[in-house]
Amino acid sequence: MSDWAIWWALAGGLLAAELFTGTFYLLMIALGLAAGGVVAWGGVPLEWQLLVAAI
């Protein structure tokens, strides 16, 4: 599985969990993971993907 697919799968899982629980912080973490997925799709190294997801 490629890096971007893993990022998007994790973001989708957290988004589904957020819909079940209704907590706002899971949505923000899912958005960070989606940002990491976008950067990974561009071919950026893993260190930068993690940095973008953390920001």
Image (cartoon, grey):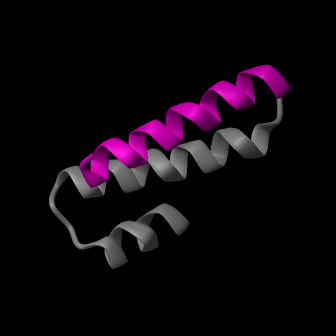
* Prevailing secondary structure class for the magenta stretch in the rendered image: helix
Q: Residue furthest top?
A: 20
Q: Is residue 9 magenta?
A: yes
Residue 52 vs 48, above or below: the answer is: above
List x then y, in percent, for residue 41.
Answer: 21, 50
Q: Residue furthest front?
A: 1
Residue at (73, 22) in percent of width and height: 19
> How many numbered marks have been drawn onto this rendered protein structure?
0
Horizontal relation, residue 48 to residue 53: left or right:
left
Horizontal relation, residue 10 to residue 49: left or right:
right
Please say whether residue 43 is visible from this viewpoint. yes
* Range shown magenta: 1-21
Residue at (41, 48) in percent of width and height: 7
Q: Residue furthest left?
A: 43
Residue 24 falls in image quadrant: top right
List x then y, in percent, for residue 10.
Answer: 51, 43
List x then y, in percent, for residue 54.
Answer: 54, 67
Please say whether residue 55 is visible from this viewpoint. no
Residue at (45, 37) in percent of width and height: 9
Residue 34 vs 17, above or below: the answer is: below
Residue at (44, 45) in percent of width and height: 34
Residue 49 falls in image quadrant: bottom left
Residue 12 vs 54, above or below: the answer is: above
Horizontal relation, residue 9 to residue 29: left or right:
left
Q: Is residue 49 magenta?
A: no
List x then y, in percent, for residue 2.
Answer: 24, 49
